[in-house]
Image (cartoon, rainbow, N blue to C red):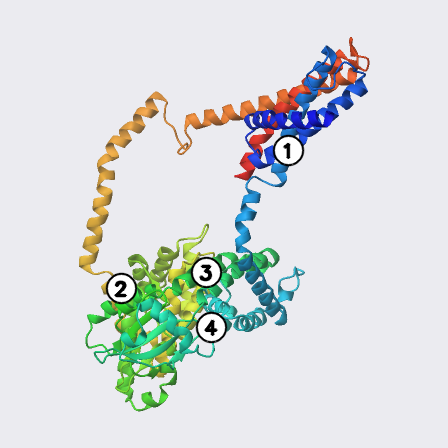
Amino acid sequence: MNLLWTILLGLINAVVVGVLVRRVITVGTGWVRNTVVSLVIGLSLWPITLQAFSILGITDHGAVPWVGLGFQAAMVFLLLYGWFIVVQMFVLLAIELVVPSGSFTTVARSASRLPTWYRRVRRLIQIQRILLKFGLGRYLRPRLPSLRLNRREIAKTTAEAFAAAGVTFVKLGQFIATRADMVPIEFVEEFSKLQSEVPPVPFSQLEPELVRAWGRPVDEVFAEFDTVPLAAASVAQVHRAVMFDGAEVVVKVQRPKLRRQVRADSDIVLTLAQQVERRAGWARKVGIVKLAAAFVDSLAAELDYRGEAAQTIALRRADIAHDDSLVRIPEVYTELSGPTVLVLERIEGVPLARAGARLDRLSALARRDLAEQLFEIVARQVLTTGIFHADLHAGNIIIDGGGRAGLIDFGAVGRLDKRDRRDVAILLVAFEQQNSQAATSAVLDMLGAPVGVDVRELQRDVGQIMMQFQTAPGGYSALFSQLIEFFVDHGFAMPSTIATAFRAISTLEGSLKLLDPQLDLLDLVREHGEGLLAETRSMSGTIEDAKLYAATTAPLFAEFPARVSRVVQHLEDGTLDIGTSGLGLDSIKELVRSLVDSLVQVVLSTALILGGVVMMAANFGPQLTSELKLFTYFGGWILLGGCTLAAIVLAPSLKNRSL
């Protein structure tokens, strides 16, 4: 019969105590855990009470809870019931500390992702094996401060490991090669050599993607379509096609399932970057986590061909104004292009890297003219338009049979605002004219001045670089590499946009040398620099900028007398408030009130707990039962109150922790 009453009392307690506890503390009292804990404690309430009655010598308790309880039994039962409530509160808070609310829901919600996690873990293990295979593990272990690493060795080994790890890591290496502002030059040089050599995907695997993109079969879109690709890379491959009007185009289509693989690998890149930065000092100095995050963002943008289409259209519009140019930018067929497919006008010819035979048939004057026009169009993109092709290596410049050039692959595009364009132009012209003061001013305007910089000493250092460049020229690529290293050493924070512009000009110089080995980029800057600089600071543009600036600052000047008057008034009446923006008096009062309330609660709960312990330990006073004195009994209630108040104080801290 006791079992029946135990179960009945347990169920009643699960309801009563569960509701009561949820009202006293609001943290860690989810209905599942609260019901389970209150039910377990409720089922143990009557058996423990009977045991307490036996220990304390109470016999008038009856066989049924609350029925037949004498005065002594009722008093003890109430105290035990109160302690059961407090125990339940602390059990729930302990569970919340170990397993915060929502954990089981999160686990259940994440169960469906287990297959994805499995693939990523398997891929992570595969990549880590590649890193270990190439011996990179030794560079991640802590080292003695006196042991110096060979950067060239690390860079070369890492580049080889990236090439073996697949497309995402090849792209990562190529991205790192563009960030000479953040990584040592050895890494830039080794990662610049990374190429993705992969066999083409059979057209049968690509055709479903084309049908999805166009909503109709390929033969309804084109009169001809070559299933054998013109070129194949790790991200996409290019096919020749002919429109029904006879126009030849190229179709750039992304490899199937590439995005899913890239997303998984991107998570792995971020995970590896965090591990490396925690374990290697050189990685913390480079800021490898920040570098990896920037790469993931840029790769996601690169895989959406709508961005490349928009960039190609913008550069083509800027180039149309010069109809006599020997450099062409292909037309984009926007109606046939999308996130994974890009259709462009086909530019006949061969890449500059393999155009030696065609160039040999051109006269020196024609080659010089083509090189100058290529420089002009790119310089105009960088310094006037503000959007420019950021990767004009010899593979992205096409040479046709008539000695004309075409630009392709606009996935890597840089952007410069008007002020940065002007500063880059001034810097180029200043180096040509050996004007260290103008160059220093341009550098400070572009990058800002580091704390404690000596501007005069900085100007001297820039002048020394100028002298070295003038007496022993190694090309603008060497100049920009030296400048970037100089900026980093002096504590300048170089924006990625500026670094991209420097790299674009350096890369262009190498391509121009293939067109005309006798060409000196310094001569081109000397010949065209003033005109390009004039375009960045045209009189009409300057006047418009001045008008806009005046329109935005005029209200401030108009309000200036009134503001001065208000400041003087506050000074006179002693109400001037300085340096408290964003922190109102009401918020300060609320913060102080909250702190005082918490402090009072802590002090009071501590006092109650200590007082209860002292009273229980004293063991004196009238006998409540044969084994329990009255002061000890009331000490139990005081200790109970202190513990309850402590639970109420502790709960908000766990809530803030969970947030």
Q: Helix, strand or loop at disc 2?
A: helix
Q: Do the numbered discs 3 and 1 sit on residues whose CB atoms are within 8 Å?
A: no
**Nearest to N terminus: mark 2 or mark 4:** 4
Residue in the picture at 35% in, 86% down: 355
| Sequence-wise first label, 2 or 1 | 1
Task: Residue 37: give its label.
Answer: 1
Amino acid identity at mark 4? Ser
Decide: few, some or many residues near mark 1? Use Cα within 10 Å; few <14, some 14-19, many ≥20. some
| Label 2 to label 4: alpha-carbon separation | 27 Å
Label 2 packing within 10 angstroms: few (<14), some (14-19), many (20+): many
Q: Which mark lies nearer to you, 3 or 1?
A: 1
Q: Pointer 3: what residue?
A: 296
Estimate how packed mark 4 is, as few (under 14), some (14 to 19) or many (20 or more) residues with alpha carbons within 10 Å.
Answer: some
User: Residue 447 at x, y = what percent?
Assistant: 39, 56
| Label 2, label 1: how far apart the Cα atoms are | 69 Å
Residue of label 2? 385
